[in-house]
Each structure stands twice: as structure tokens, then as C-alpha cells.
Image (cartoon, rainbow, N blue to C red):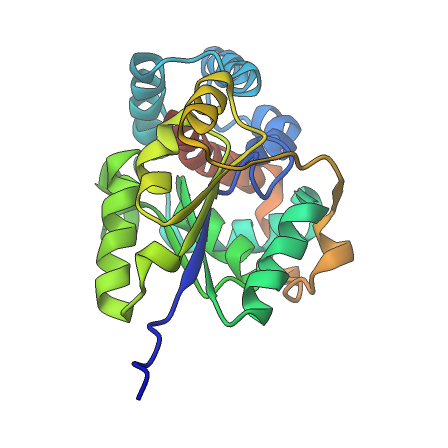
Amino acid sequence: MSPVARPTAAFFDLDKTIIAKSSTLAFSREFQAGGLISRGAVLRSAYAQFVYLVGGADHDQMEKMRQFMSQLCSGWDVETVKEIVADTLHNIVDPLVYDEAVSLIETHHLAGRDVIIVSTSGSEVVEPIGEMLGADKVIATRMEVADGKYTGDIRFYAYAENKAKAIRDLARKRGYDLDRCYAYSDSVTDVFMLEAVGHPYAVNPDKDLRRIARDRGWPILVFEKPVALRSRMKLPPRVPALAALGVGGVAAIGAAYWLGARRRRATA
């Protein structure tokens, strides 16, 4: 009698792997208009967004930016942030996703695999996006919370080796056969994550990941057909009550989201 096959999963990085651009850029206007932070902080975040796009930041630069954004979020009300995220995703962000990535997610589901999004972005943003995409689970950065507010410290940083560890921990919990699992990412900082599975794929890789993928014989995928997320997936219902929060609230979530995405670049 043949042994029962263990379950498998496909692990996806988020920004530049599923989402076709920095997911934080959609908040730029609201982030500046809201008056939540100083002009100096706005300029600093704009510079970091530029660095994110060109992919030229090293680990030390990303660590400094991570610390900056963590401190910026200190004291924000957690539930307000979550509510703003829900409303912003529906009405403002509507992030562009790669059609190829969404099709690949659907293919893995049809093959009976779980789909897991693994992102350095904050869980408050990644979880609702994961829900839109039909992901079975999300692994993301989690901020420390006390009395319903962010302390500015990080409880779990989903970056580099931490991503791989989280994948292995989840595999033990769910019984995944990692040798038969898949992983997708665009960044060299996710090499640890890609090494954790038997079927790693580089998606629109940066130059360092491209070199590693070629050296190791990993397939390289090119995603180039961005489509509006709402055209591919059913979005959650709007939360009308959030209109009362105004632009300042949207700016707050812009910063919170950018905190995660900036880290995510540190990790990819």
C-alpha cells in the first residue's frame, strides 16, 4: 500500500512578486496631505520609496529606515489602523497585481496546495490583501502592542532568515513536505526562503538573485501584465464609517503600511 502523500504549499513574497509595484506608493498623496508627520519625515519616506523602486538599498540602510518607521508608528491606535487599511484597500489602493501571479495562485489551489503569503510588510496590511487573493495563511511582520496601541517595537520581523524559519515552523505544524513545496520572490534577501523549498522560483529578480538563480539552476519567471486587483478578485465590503476619519487617518495607515513594506524591501 502506497504511503499517503503529505500536503504541500506555495509560498509567495508580496511586493514586486504579486503586487506589481511598491504597495506603499498608493499612499503617497494621503501620507503627505494628512499632516501626521513633519515635512522632513515625508521627504525621508519619499527617498526610501525611491530606493525601494531602484532596489539599490543595502541592509544597513534598510535597517535604519525600519527603525525610523517603527518609531513613527509608536502610539498609533491598532484598531483605527486596521479599519483605515480596510477602507483604503477598497477605495484608494486597489493595488495592481501581476495577472501571472494571480493565475499562478489559482493554479496552485487547483493542484490542492495551500497558498501562503510571506511578507516583511505589516500584518495589518498583508492580511487583508491575502484575504483578497484567497491566500490560506499570511506570514508578516507583527508590531508589539500595549493597551491597544503600537509601542514602536517589533514582535516578529518577517525578514531574511526569519522568513525561512517561519516557513519551516509552519511546515512542521501543518505537515508540509517542503521538498515538494514552491516559493516565489524577486529579492536576494529571500534566498533563505527560496532555499527552504524544493521548487524555488525567482520572479522579476534583482541582479543578485538573478545571478544566484542562474548559478543554481532555479527557474526565472517574468511577470509583466499588471491588472487591477478588483478586476481579478472579490474585494471585501466597504466600511463607510471610516469616511469620518478623514485624510489624516489615511496618512496614518500610509505610514504604518510603509513601515512594513520598507522592511519588506530590507527582506524582500
Residue 48 position, x and y percent, is 48, 16
Q: How many marks?
A: 0
Residue 203: image quadrant is top right
Locate residue 176, reporting x and y percent: 31, 65
Compare residues 241 and 158 and report the one nearer the observer: 158
Q: Is residue 150 visible?
A: no
Q: Residue furthest front?
A: 1
Image location (x, y in percent) of residue 87? 61, 54
Q: Please name whichever residue, 172 or 68, is drawn nearer the observer in this view of the structure.
A: 172
Residue at the (33%, 81%) spot, across then down: 4
In the rendered view, would you say 218 is above or below 60?
below
Along the horizontal axis of the image, is 146 left or right of 252? left
- Residue 220 in view (yes/no): yes
* Quarter of the picture holding the C terminus: top left
Q: Considering the image in quadrants, where does the N terminus appear?
A: bottom left
Q: Position of residue 231 (x, y in %)?
A: 78, 55
Residue at the extreme bottom of the image, as rendered: 1
